[in-house]
Image (tube, rainbow, N blue to C red):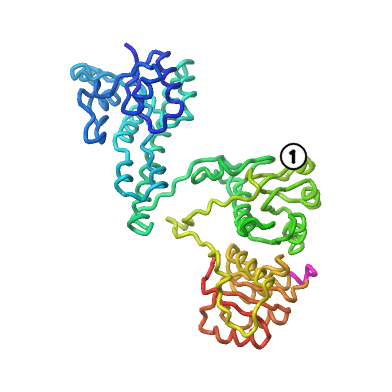
Amino acid sequence: MAKRALVSVSDKAGIVEFCSSLVKNGYEIISTGGTYKKLVEAGIAAIEIDEVTKFPECFEGRVKTLNPYVHGGILHRRDKQSHLDQAKELGVESIDLVCVNLYPFKETIEKTDNFDDIIENIDIGGPAMVRSAAKNFDAVIIVTNVEDYSEVIDAIENEKNTKDFRRGYMIKAYEHTAAYDSMIANYMNERFNDGFGEKQFVVGNKVMDTRYGENPHQKGALYEFDKHFSNNFTTLKGEASFNNLNDLNGAVKIAAGFGSDNAVCISKHGNPCGFAIKDTLLEAYTEALKCDPVSAFGGVVAVNGTVNAELAEKMNEIFLEVVIAGRITEEAQEIFAKKKRIKLFEMGSDKLILANDKKDFKHVDGGFVFQDADVVGKDEVKNAKLVSKNTATAAEMKDLEIAYKVASLTKSNCVVYVKDAAMVAVGMGMTSRVDAAQCALKKAKDMGLDVRGAALASEAFFPFRDSIDAAAEAGIKNVIEPGGSIRDQEIIDAADEFGMSLYFSEVRHFLH
């Protein structure tokens, strides 16, 4: 008896070729709706679903495969005589392969807000068939991904259609339906519960294993949302570790946070130790490196543009572990090849690309905390409230903007000092804000950097004037912070006393 394949797909890419191969391998094709029409137009003999169900599609297509002749054909056990006898008694014929991909819910919510259209694009019969076929993987192949068609045909033609093979596809199938239902639940909660329903689902697609996790005794892997890494992350040299990915995440967010500016960020352990915006990327890297060349050793460099040979030569003067850029030219790659341990990644674009995820979460013991993603508003610095007598010049406002944005992406408590569009000092992850300010200034002094005239940003309010006093002693001219302290007036008075400009953004950007 010929084997039978049930084929019903929303994404019809490659389906004609796949079904043609199935037919050549002795399968009869059962199909539905648009899939059936496409196959018949291509000259492939197919049986329409209602010939199997003995019942017409009804309720505008809402019910077509939810039928015992379909699910009985999929689910009855071939290794149990009682099942085989009952199938024969009921006239249920075996379905040995199910190829289903689901109604395009994601594409629908991306293109319309019409709730009726969205509801109609929630698949019911599809997930039911997928789950049935997956449950009976002992006898049935379940195919849910266009990219798997050739592997399935290869398995059928070359005696690789083993139980282990089908089990792998069973796992993929349940991942597929779980992700689909998660997407629907998350969308409904976003629409009706401000995104914070009784359940929260975080679903990622595996990109690659990392050699290990934070430490060699831990396993690790990278998962992505919406193909961000698949589309925008190419390995040119080396292998990204768990820690590399975490570190370059911080560097890329900062370097890409200034639009098309020629920005370079150097980071270590997820925090910036150098940043600059200049007329050329070479100048930007050179200035960024001056902030803390000691910490930059073995660090991550994110370049918002193309790394050319000249920049590569400059970078090769010290040991860098990771370079990520919009592009890295072939000439630059040849220069980096001299360094065995350096890892190179590019995004295949003129500039770095951010995913701009709308949500953010962090693991805590026993669960995770979930929140709206933090972002510095486009005009947040521009619209900051001047609270001092002195004002900043346009160039000084640019320094304030840079310091403020970098501070928002640096571990609290933190302060950032910027002069002439380059970071000259940073203090981060301190338990006291004044300690962060003084630590940064001490480091700048050790590096021989002149911070006089620099802009100072804090990601949260200064609780006491001591940080302003320390800044004034160092020659800082301009300060931006959120404000909101009960001692704000003391801070304002201190700024006026020292002839500083002081701006309150009235938005806090903690990063814990």
Residue 405, x across and y down, in percent: 60, 65
Image quarter of the C terminus: bottom right
Q: Is residue 339 above or below residue 169?
A: below
* Residue type of the residue flagged with mark 1: Glu
* Rendered image quadrant of residue 291: bottom right
**Residue at left 25%, top 18%?**
84
Judge left or right: residue 348 versus residue 222: right
Viewer-closest of 152 and 125: 125
221 to the left or right of 263: left
Q: Is residue 435 visible?
A: yes
Magenta span has 349?
A: no
**Residue visible at 34% across and 58% down?**
193
Percent across and percent down for residue 388 are 61, 83
Q: How many marks?
A: 1
Report x, y in % for residue 113. 36, 50
Q: Nearer the viewer, residue 381 or 251?
A: 381
Report the span colored magenta.
Answer: 444-449
In the image: residue 257, left or right of residue 454: left
From the top left corner, tell me how far across and down residue 460 is, in percent: 55, 73
Quadrant of image for the N terminus: top left
On screen, residue 345 above or below 396: above
Q: Which residue is mark 1?
A: 330
**In the image, is residue 485 above or below residue 376?**
below
